[in-house]
Image (cartoon, rainbow, N blue to C red):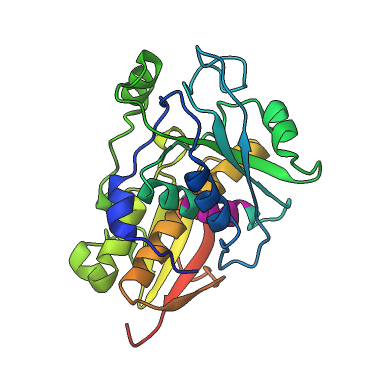
Amino acid sequence: MKLSIPVAETIQKRHSVRTYEDRTLSPQDRAALLDYINQLDNPFGVPVKKYITDKKLSADGEKLGTYGVIKGASTFLGVSIPNTEMAPVAAGYEFENLILYATNMGLGTVWLAATFNRDSFASAMHIPKDELFPAISPVGYPAAKRSLTETLMRSTMKSSSRKEWASLFYQEDFRTPLTKSMAGAYAQPLEMVRLAPSAKNAQPWRVRKDGNTYHFYANYKPGISKGEEAIKRVDLGIALAHFHQTALEQGLTGTFETMPQEDVAIPENTHYIISWHADETN
């Protein structure tokens, strides 16, 4: 589904919000989010369940299972998926599209993958026992001033910084950096990939252009837990949402496909996810 919002503009405007006004969502805003939740889909053929729940935080932001990270929010979004290989990617794709829609509404959000108590939120959102529950996000009205906790977290994680093109995007092999001029019409979709949020701001995506095909990879060390690997794949789904929706906004068309990678030397810690095969007319 093509988002009905100015995608690139919204991506550049979006930022993580952890401090909220102490008021509930208006009935109109809550209804708009719920309506949009029911419209979302993904191009990977994976069923993704989205949730919205109201559960008031105490005045100091504790007790709800966000470990004091979130202040003032009383409404939360969540996502659950089956335990399949592409499901975390699909979750990242759909949930990021929901977050961008909320951003366009003027609401604040922030991806939470580790700093929340899964048991309490799974209970509140009625997550099925056999589903993976990779992330939640508060949603509400941003406070005028950030809490001290949020200010320190943003500084520690360097939340506003992003890696440069040369360390993320490649031409044909993993030795030749892809420039914006080489990317041509896909320069903006790739720039929106670069700006995507990720757990601990790790920016694990790598993209290799080969002709009119863009191959997407996740960068992480072997031996991490299955949960950590799932989060890296969620991050790739976020990046793919930015790439795909920006491409659609520009009238660029193509298809996501799983393609052989035997003809290229893939660096250590780099794991193939999926490819975008652009239509010849682009």
The magenta span reads 88-96
* Residue 17 appearing in the image: yes
Seen in the picture, residue 212 relative to 159 is either above or below; the reply is: below
* Residue 265 appearing in the image: no
On the image, which quarter does residue 250 sit in?
Answer: bottom left
- With 51 as the anchor, is 178 left or right in this view? left
Whole-percent x, y for residue 18 in the image = 42, 27
Whole-percent x, y for residue 6 in the image = 32, 60
Check the image and name the residue furthest to the left: 181
On the image, which quarter does residue 259 sit in?
Answer: bottom right
Number of numbered tags placed on the structure image: 0
- With 84 as the anchor, is 26 left or right in this view? left
Q: Quadrant of the C terminus?
A: bottom left
Whole-percent x, y for residue 274 in the image = 52, 64
Seen in the picture, residue 173 relative to 220 is either above or below; the reply is: below
Q: Is residue 79 magenta?
A: no
Seen in the picture, residue 27 relative to 240 is either above or below; the reply is: above
Q: Residue at x 35, y 64 (%)?
A: 246
The foreground one among 55 and 8 is 55
Check the image and name the residue furthest to the right: 129
Check the image and name the residue furthest to the front: 27
Seen in the picture, residue 8 relative to 248 is either above or below; the reply is: above
Q: Residue at x 54, y 28 (%)?
A: 74
The foreground one among 172 and 243 is 243
Q: Main secondary structure of the magenta part?
A: helix
The foreground one among 246 and 202 is 246
Whole-percent x, y for residue 249 in the image = 34, 69
